[in-house]
Image: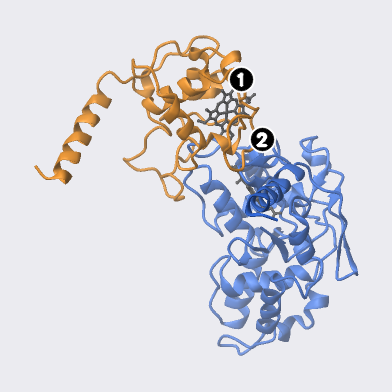
Amino acid sequence: MKLGTLTLALAMMAGTAMAEGVMAPQDVEFDDYGSVEQSLTGKPGDPENGLKVYASKGSGNCVACHKIDAIDAAFPGNVGPELTGAGDRWSEAELRGILVNSKKTFPGTVMPAYYKVDGFIRPGNAYTGKAADDSFGPLLTAWEIEDLVAFLSALKE
Amino acid sequence: MNFKTLSVVAAVALAMPALGSADPDDDTLIINEEIEVATKVEPAEHLDGALYEVISGWHFRNDDTQAMEMDDFDNPAMLGAENGMAIWNTADGSEGKSCADCHGDAAESMKGVKATYPKFDEKAGTLMTVQMKVNECRTERMGAEAWSYDAGPAIDMEAMIGSQSRGMPMNVAIDGPAEPFWEKGKEIYYTRYGQLELSCASCHEENYGNMIRADHLSQGQTNGFPTYRLKNAKLNGAHSRFKGCIRDTRAETFNPGSDEFIALELYVASRGNGLGVESPSVRN
């Protein structure tokens, strides 16, 4: 097997593994305060990847609105509160809920919902300005949400 | 100075504007040492307390960008306005007429236009923007083709016409036949579009003065349009700006010249009633 085929086969395996045991956005259950108890993947997240998702523009881009003292990301915004010490203030379930759909925790907040696929007005195809098509999915994957939960939980002062 | 100190200094210099510019500044805008422009005014009553002060986007830009707008020789947008003036004086279309043939000196006939548009037009029975009005003259009186919205000649002409109102207070009418358009524009302004579920108000009412990544959010006022953006180095129309902002919410946008953006332009302009006209302005 050539290397190309091998990586493709691996990618496909990863694809199936992802579909299995991963909670779909429509199936997530919130408690009355917006928390989500159950892990979206059933596996602990990877905090290092969580940091990447947090800081990179093409991914979570959380730095557009938030700042964390210990992290040296370019141009942190201040539309949202500083997340320094977020792990002291919030449990994992609360953080998961804030990421999946922050509006269940903070009604009316400007913070986007990262694991939601319906209820949008004129949803677009990423940043093209065109209408959404079949490729439309949540802003982040279940794995990325869990990585962020792990990363934020570790932010203690 | 060794390399290390230099990069530290550079890093600090880069960080400064972001930190230092959290609030609109207190500078005064006088163009060509002559035209005083009101850039901070009392909100109109129809804003219902949504803003406690109405502030031009000029205050949210850095000193260099601000300075470019204060002198026509430094203002790159004036090249577009000059081209608009050349077109004004040039005959076009099957009737062989120029704008000047009917309207004479733009400095007189076009004074105050930008301050009161979009405006309900009795004859057309609808709300019209400056660009629509120009196209009406072109197609109905000059026998020329309509220009496409926010593009080349249309935006240069709008810049020239806008410049004739500099310093005059924005004063669009929102009552009478304009009211249903205003209501529609207001609804669009507060609708949370796209996958990011953000409305105009999410950024420009709730968060002006804050930083969203490297962008210093203003109130999104239109008193400076058309505006020369350093980012794309050309004149930009208000509708094109609206389109870009809606696209950034990961939404399906509306198009320049659409009924939605015409109504939205009236509503946004009315939020800025009282601000001095800056057209054509400079922004980043």
Marks 2 and 1 share the same chain: yes
| Numbered circles on residues, count | 2
Looking at the rendering, in which quadrant would you find the C terminus of chain B?
bottom right
Disc 1 secondary structure class: loop
Tell me what hue chain A is rendered in. Answer: orange
Res. A85 mark: 1
Give the alpha-carbon distance from disc 2 to disc 1, as whole Å. 16 Å
Report the chain holding disc 2: A
Q: Amino acid at mark 1?
A: Gly
Res. A78 mark: 2
* 2 and 1 marks in contact (CB < 8 Å): no
Disc 2 secondary structure class: loop
Mark 2 or 1: the one toward you: 1
Task: Please give the name of the residue rendered at 57% of the width and 85% of the height, measured from the top-left corner.
Answer: B93
Tell me what hue chain B is rendered in. Answer: blue
The correct choice, above or below, for A46 with respect to B96 in the image is above
On the question of residue B179 being in view, the answer is: no
Q: Does residue A23 appear left or right of residue A91 in this picture?
A: left
The correct choice, above or below, for A42 with respect to B276 in the image is above
The residue lying toward the viewer, choosing from B181 and B224, is: B224
The correct choice, above or below, for B264 with respect to B187 in the image is below
Q: Amino acid at mark 2?
A: Asn
For disc 1, the neighbor class at 10 Å (few under 14, some 14 to 19, many from 20) is some
Task: Please give the name of the residue rendered at 61% of the width and 32% of the height, measured from the top-left corner.
Answer: A66
